[in-house]
Image: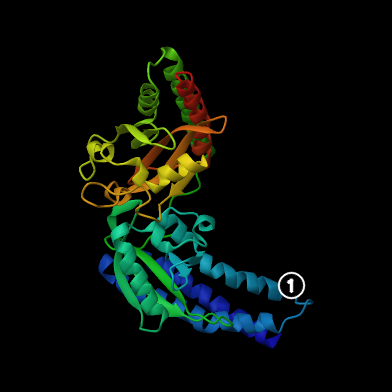
Amino acid sequence: MAQTEEFGEELADFVRRVAELKAARSVPHDDLPTVLDTAIFELDHVAGQLWPWYERLTATGTAGTSSADRQEQQLLKGIFQRLPLPVALMDRETVVRRLNFAATNFTGVRAGYATGRPLTGFLAHPDRAAFRSQTAAVARGDGDRSLTVHLQQRPAVPVRATLTALRPSGEPRTAVLVVLQSADVRAPSAEGGPGPVPDLGETTRHAALMDLLDAMTTALLSEPARTRAAVLERAARVLHGRFADWVVADEGAARLCRTTVLGPADQRDVRAEDLEAQDPAACPLVVEAARGGSTALQVRPEDPDAFGRDASDAPVLVRANVTSLLCVPLTLDGAVQGVLTLFRTGPRLAFSMAEAQAMDMMSRHIALAMAKLD
């Protein structure tokens, strides 16, 4: 019990220091590196002293552990979540093990979604290799590192990532702690980040989906199309802009034929003509959808070659800055009539499961309209 009380006093002192760090967020921009260094020192203290201490207490505990001990254990777990800076714990392959509240607000990624996924998946493609390399160097004991990266959702904002190694007690491998901070503004805080999405926003998105379903049904029934390609083009125009930045339509299954490509008018890196010239058979996502007949929803696609390459041999997903995609087979009675691929780019909100379900419903309607022309 004496050790538990001593641990509680040390923990309470640490919490007070965290409160002081929170108050220091208002210091001038030039003084922020000192605040950041202090925060990293406190994190090292947690990793090197408090966490092993906590594990020793839990290892020697019994089923009759007192309520006070359990509360202190919960408090230790909560410290990580309440740290004033965005912090993530990951392994040497950058797979996220834990993300605190400030980091979820800073990245816009839910902790439950991020856990078990590589942190590199949330970075811009040009930064991923460097981040993996620096993480591996820190994990193998080459010292702390710091580099500038960019989040895929906000590619224009530079982010300073500071990496430090720690060795969780009882684990055979070194973990890596990463602190994220905007390189051109003061450190973000959990209080200043966006709050939970209100119910009104959810209602608005649901109403927008209903409007989209109505527009699709109207387009398919307004006047008969003469060809299957005309059906695909009509559906693509309904989806373009209001639902997706890019819409790519391929007809067939065993032999895919690209019929329609609609993209942003101001897109400079990738032109619609580049995607029209692609062979759909060179797009693994499209081929898989045509063969398996199942919808693919990807947020921050990990494989840059999933939609093939353009005429300059550059990955289409990278050139178009695709942040989420839907690849939907147009299936009727088990037979694939074609494939629709939808891209959202830049800061636009990623496709949700509700939107994927709505798209699945529309795909059956489109396939039915195509089948009538056989």
Residue 270: x percent and y percent? 24, 43
Query: Where residue 69 sits in the image (x, y, percent)?
Result: 69, 76
Image position, residue 290 (x, y; %): 46, 39
Q: Residue at x 48, y 61 (%)?
A: 117
Amino acid at the residue labelled 1 = Ser
Coloring basis for residues: rainbow
- Asked where in the image residue 31 lies, by quadrant, the reply is bottom left
Furthest residue toward right: 64
Q: Is residue 163 left or right of residue 126?
A: right
The residue at the far top in this view is 223
The residue nearer to you, when weighing 260 against 3, is 260
Q: Is residue 23 visible?
A: yes
For mark 1, give the secondary structure. helix
Q: Residue at x 40, y 77 (%)?
A: 164
> Is residue 10 something that shows in the picture?
no
Which residue position is annotated with label 1? Answer: 67
Q: Residue at x 37, y 29 (%)?
A: 236
- In percent of width and height, residue 212 lies at 45, 26
Quarter of the image with the N terminus in it: bottom right
Relative height, residue 83 to residue 272 (above, below): below
Depicted 5 relative to depicted 225: above or below:
below
Tally of numbered tags = 1
Residue at 51% x, 39% y is 293
Residue 147 in the figure: left or right of residue 168: left
Badge 1 density bin: few <14, some 14–19, many ≥20, Cα 10 Å? few
Q: Residue furthest bottom?
A: 2
Relative to the observer, which residue lies in front, 177 or 120?
120
